[in-house]
Amino acid sequence: QLQVEDDDKIGLYSYKVQSTITSRLANTMIQAKMVNNAKRSQHIVFDVQVPKGAFIDNFTMDVNGITFTSKIREKSEARKMYSQAKAKGKAAGIVRSNALDMENFQTEVNVPPGTRIQFELHYHEMIRRKLSSYEHVVSVKPGRLAKHMEVDVRIIEPQGLRYVHVPNSLGHHFDGITTISKGEKKAHVSFKPTMAQQRKCPTCSSTAVDGNFVVQYDVNRETTGGELEIFNGYFIHFFAPENLDPLPKNILFVIDVSGSMWGLKMKQTIEAMKAILSELRAADQFSLIDFNHNVRCWRDNLVSATPAQVEDAKKYIQTIHPNGGTNINEALLRATFILNEAQNLGMLDPNSVSMIVLVSDGDPTVGELKLTTIQKNVKQSIKDEFSLFCLGIGFDVDYDFLQRIATDNRGMAQRIFGNQETSAQMKNFYNQVSTPLLKKIQFNYPQESVSDVTQSSFHNYFGGSEIVVAGKVDTENLQHLESVVTATAANAELVMETLRDVEELDGFMKKDKYADPEFTKKLWAYLTVNQMLAERNTAPTAALKRNITKSILQMSLDHHIVTPFTAMLIENAEKDEIMLADQPKDPRRGCCPGTLGLTPNAPNNNKGIPAWANVTAVPVSFMPEQRSPPVSSLSINRVDNDPHFIIHLPKSQRNICFNINSEPGKILNLVSDPGTGVVVNGQLVGAKKTENKKLNTYFGKIGFYFKNKGLKVEITTETITLKDGSYGITLTWSDTGHIIRKQLLISVKKESNVTVTVGEEMSFMVLLHRVWKNHPVNVDFLGIYIPPENQLSPEAHGLIGQFASEPEVYIHHQRPGQAPEKPQATMEVKGNKLTVTRGLQKDYRTDRVLGTDVQCWFVHNSGKGFIDGHYKDYLVPHLYSFLKKP
């Protein structure tokens, strides 16, 4: 806002806000141009709001053609230079404000009559994903009507934009003024109200533009393993997998009911808690603790979130009457005790995520009062895998302490206003942590190619959020960068591989004149500095704190940013006028935004997947040594293309082929083995239209059922899904990765094949055949390869399974056929005499496009006489059905 003594004499002739977002890095400029039309000098204040956590990187000022520029210095050095210069009545400052997530930047200048002045502030920040969207917020508070006014936001996202939305955050007054143009990877949002549109009413001289301009968007996500963006010697890894089942959670709500919570705060807290309890899932366990000078528990232990228990908990909350003091120490220790006890008694699902959510509005007044001691007590009693989240209501609460204690225990803190919005803000915060999808996430990169990697292991990944890891990469000596992410999902261990060409983005970045070529470097610095600030916050020794402070300072100077340890000097070219922009430290406001808690790297003890990828969850003997399945080039039974079966008979060293022509939608049984409890079925899809009066059919879906493990695998031309009871986990064909569950390994090779391996006993390979999307006839289909080495039982049957015990085959009487290259012969098998034709079939495992020719004897009439019974006997009702005994 621009404030002046004699208001109407100051003309604001331009007010501009410009933001460019390149891959979540937002660079913002706020510029105001004014003129003093009064007969005397006036004080003008340039006061703008900057998002908390953003880095101010430049400020310039132009007074009647004299330019002031800025430089960053270590704080005490800057203050010394400033006091030496004893500036001529000018001051600039970064002032902490009471806004929820903004702080103010203020400059005050004395402007002579007739003088023009221009202010320009630049800052940048990384936009974090929350509740499945990125939200870019710029403060637009010109304080007066502007002749020319515009807010201009450009978004450049190489991953592609899923949507762009501009909510009406400035009020209905401005309906229809914002324009959005969106392309595949870029968007432009513009807001340019005329002077008439800015007025509060047609005759008003005051402006209606007063608030935040908000742009929300999300990007496309192809792969589960995340997106690697590499540019200018840095890499950024964005990781936000979706379609996973939530992990069950064990959650303890610890609610402050001391006297200060009385009235609106408590009313809003009760309303929020009732909504939150309703959203607990059936697999969750929970309890409630409320505390003032005493600590009360609704239940002394965790209970399942059944409808009856949830109702009971809601009734309990209704009866709370706030009074008395605040014993935070006791309340948190009681909560950790309940969780620890449940763990010791084996009551917690090993795959679940445990958390404590503290809601409080003030400092301790009863029991342990020393904050550092409370912090130490909680850290000592809480187990490594539990997280603590803190909600601070209002401004009497020591937010810095809540942030420290949360960061220290793998959680995060948020400040909430004690007003009408409290309930909505609490629910919003809960929704950010209500859906844990993965735990123990570890990002691995080849050590010889990367350095200075930011935090790379994380406790939890919550649905709707995003994990971002950055580092330096040696692009000179590297063609591709590979990453391996390992994590625990609801019903399996996941290993996801991503491979990116280090030059992939170069062309895109060079073509776009708005994209920030420094975006990777700035994101890396942003993450690194924030991480150091968080580490400094919880550093156990003074010496360590000093070292971290030194590193932060160096980074701030190298990257020209204002942090708590630097200040900005603003001076004119003659250096005779100087201003200082500094951050006064206010203990009530907390110092710095934190990142999530850090956990040590797991030891590396695995083979198969690259050595630098620490896969902890996999028994070593069970990792696939080769990337392709362990099968010799020919001895394999398979179905590929327009159901052509090729059966290899190892004893007689022959290949026998047959076709099966059935209708789309029908399901054929390939292997049905009650002995080992294994079923493999294939469902047919038809071509888009008939050719030569015949509709070709192919396998469009293949189902595996491993009865003894209770696991099902469904492979389509789109996705690969592992099902375990009600849990499912899905990869797409654009992933490269592994799912591991109960000694079953599913390995996906991007756009190529899937191998399903069961311990040492069996493996199956499914190949993807992609056709041109607009092909008039052909469709995408699957081929399946089943090695004869698979250890099936004597009871095995099915179109392929029946040949696990090899029949005697006698081929004689070779004679010329109708075509010279297709001789005929007589084959005796299973008591039948058949006429067979010599021909070639394709094996697509080595050459996916052209295939390799395989010689075989072809049995006519859908394999009649070679297979037991008729092919229709092999039709089954469901994708996971065993074959009925004839």
Image (tube, grey):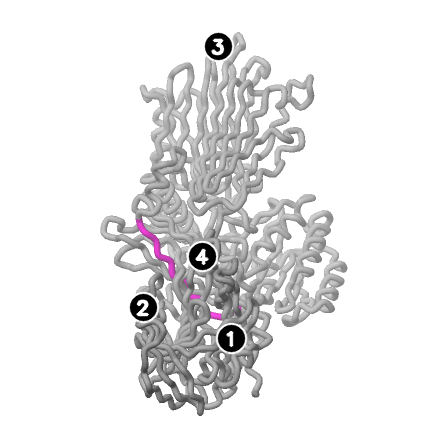
Do the CB atoms of the residues marked 4 and 1 lie less than 8 Å apart? no
Where does label 1 land, which residue?
681
- Sequence-earlier tag: 2 or 1: 1
Name the residue tied to disc 2. Answer: 852
Residue located 39% across and 63% down the image: 752
Instruction: Please tell me whether mark 1 sits on a helix, a strand or a loop.
Output: strand
* Image depth: mark 2 or mark 4 in front: 2
In the image, residue 402 sits, relative to residue 20, either above or below, namely below
CB under 8 Å between discs 3 and 2? no
Q: Amino acid at mark 1?
A: Asn
Q: Is residue 496 magenta?
A: yes
- Percent position of residue 81, x then y: 34, 29
Picture quarter with the C terminus: bottom right
Taking the image as shown, residue 65 lies to the left or right of residue 422, namely left
Which residue is identified by label 3?
114
Residue under the image location 63 percent in, 70 percent down: 302
Whether residue 132 is in magenta: the answer is no
Viewer-side residue, 535 vs 848: 848
Magenta extent: 489-502
